[in-house]
Amino acid sequence: MSSQTVPEKKLIFDKDEWLHLQKICERGYPREVCGLLLGKPAEQSSGISKVTSVVTLQNVLARDTSRLEQLKQSHSIQLPQDRMSRGGQYEFVIDPKEHFQKLNDASKEGFDQVGIFHSHPDHPAVPSEIDASQPFLAGWSNVIVAVDKGAFKEARSWFRITEESSFQEENIFVE
């Protein structure tokens, strides 16, 4: 992977949304939970993004096998059968249609996507090998929430400029 350096970045959460994120991930345990971080995007010069809303997206690996099969048949996703059959315990897949709909709803309220989040059940809040292989994780703040035995442990945010870049940690602040 390329080692492009990410300019100093800062992700600021509204306190209520920070607590909401933790609860969402705890409720989803032992499966990976995923969703969108919405707010006002960072100004290029400041590198600051503020999360004012956390929106859950369905992990189709965990819940909707019929939708998962539709996505595979339409070539919207390409996953080997062994990864499809794990039930969302070690990774997530977002439905592109749901993602688009949630972004469309957010834009009507003046919000934009500033990042995504997902949980790591009983695993550290660092990008996994599977995370590193996902091209759609580039260009966004990627908050990974470690949930240990059903309880929030920590959350860390990661950013990479391109899919070839390495993830670099960005600071999280709660106001």
Image: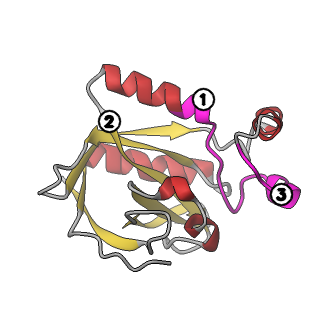
Amino acid at the residue labelled 1: Lys
Q: How is the image coloured?
A: secondary structure
- What x and y, as percent, mark residue 168? 37, 74
Residue tagged 2: 112
Q: Quadrant of residue 57?
A: top right
Query: In the rendered image of this protein, does residue 152 appear above or below residue 73?
Result: below
Is 115 covered by the magenta stretch? no
Q: In the figure, is residue 147 to the left or right of 109? A: right
Secondary structure at badge 2 equals strand
Amino acid at the residue labelled 2: Asp
- What x and y, as percent, mark residue 41? 25, 44
Circle number at residue 78: none
Q: Residue at x 44, y 53 (%)?
A: 22
Residue reaching furthest to the left? 45
- What x and y, as percent, mark residue 68? 77, 39
Choose between 2 and 60: the one closer to the eye.
2
Q: Earlier in the sequence, mark 2 or mark 1?
A: 1
Amino acid at the residue labelled 3: Pro
Q: Residues within 10 Å of mark 1 (few under 14, many from 20)?
A: few
Residue tagged 1: 97
Is 86 covered by the magenta stretch? yes
Instruction: Give the distance between the C-alpha atoms of the residues marked 3 and 1, in whole angstroms.
Output: 21 Å
Q: Are marks 2 and 1 in contact (CB under 8 Å)?
A: no
Q: Residues within 10 Å of mark 3 (few under 14, many from 20)?
A: few
Secondary structure at badge 1 equals helix
Q: Residue at x 39, y 54 (%)?
A: 140
Q: Quadrant of residue 160?
A: bottom left
Q: Which residues are magenta?
A: 77-99
Q: Earlier in the sequence, mark 3 or mark 1?
A: 3
- What x and y, as percent, mark residue 33? 58, 50
Residue tagged 3: 80
Secondary structure at badge 3 equals loop
